[in-house]
Amino acid sequence: MPESNQIKPPIGKVFMHPNTLTMFRVLAVPLLIVLLLFDNRLAGFIAAIVFSLAAITDYLDGYIARRYGLVSNLGKILDPLADKMLISSAFIMMIPLDRVPAWIVCVIIGRELAITGFRNIITDHGDDASASMLGKYKTGFQIAAIIPLLLHFPYFGIDFHAIGSLLLWVALVFTVWSGVDYVVRFRRYIEYE
């Protein structure tokens, strides 16, 4: 049997495989939804922990995939889908709790849907549709806003809702900015379609 040039992950194939970590994000979504059906301190705290752990896997799966040569077509599709499911679910579930304005959630999710469709057109033409640094900042600020908004209640005199709301405005700016940047960079594909 030929030897593989790939370095094996240190903990094991199943638990350290990027697609397993991505699936953890997908499986975290229903748990997050159930937790956010309850507007209390305990549910918000647990939801923040679940979301934080799921968000960490977003970094880990990409790192492991690149480091150990485990990049796959399934992972390329599943990874951004899992991110959008996790972030969108958290934002949508916080609307009836009055933690986020519905119009901001509409802008964020609308941008994600539009850019995902646009990205499909770009990849169909064989071009690289990877996220830019602006897109990475957008995701980072969205995650940074969601965690304190999930906590919501004051802890140790810290107003987590106010912190989350401020970060949400920053995330909104990066969401719109990165969306416009993406369209400008790849506008030639709009003319083809």
Image: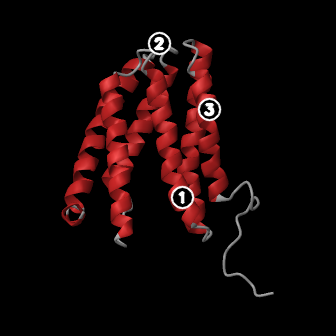
Instruction: Examine the rendered structure and indicate whether residue 174 appears above or below residue 95.
Output: below
- SS for dot 3: helix
- Residue at position x 44%, y 29% in the image: 91
Instruction: State which mark lies toward you, 3 or 2.
Output: 3
Can residue 20 be spotted in the picture?
Answer: yes
Along the viewing direction, whichever of 75 and 51 lies nearer the viewer: 75
Q: Residue furthest right?
A: 1
- SS for dot 1: helix
| Labels 3 and 2: the sequence-earlier one | 3
- Residue at position x 74%, y 62% in the image: 13
Residue type for callout 1? Gly
Is 42 placed left or right of 15 in the picture?
Answer: left
The tag on residue 30 is 3
| Labels 3 and 1: the sequence-earlier one | 3
Is 166 placed left or right of 151 in the picture?
Answer: left
Between the C-alphas of marks 1 and 2, the distance is 36 Å
Between the C-alphas of marks 3 and 2, the distance is 31 Å
Where residue 105 sits, quadrant-wise, is: top left
Quadrant (top left, top right, bottom left, bottom right) of the N terminus:
bottom right
Q: Name the residue under label 2.
A: 157
Where residue 143 sits, quadrant-wise, is: top left
Q: Position of residue 189 (x, y in %)?
A: 24, 64
- Residue at position x 38%, y 39% in the image: 141
- SS for dot 2: loop
Is 54 placed left or right of 16 in the picture?
Answer: left
- Residue at position x 58%, y 41% in the image: 54
The tag on residue 62 is 1
Residue type for callout 3? Pro
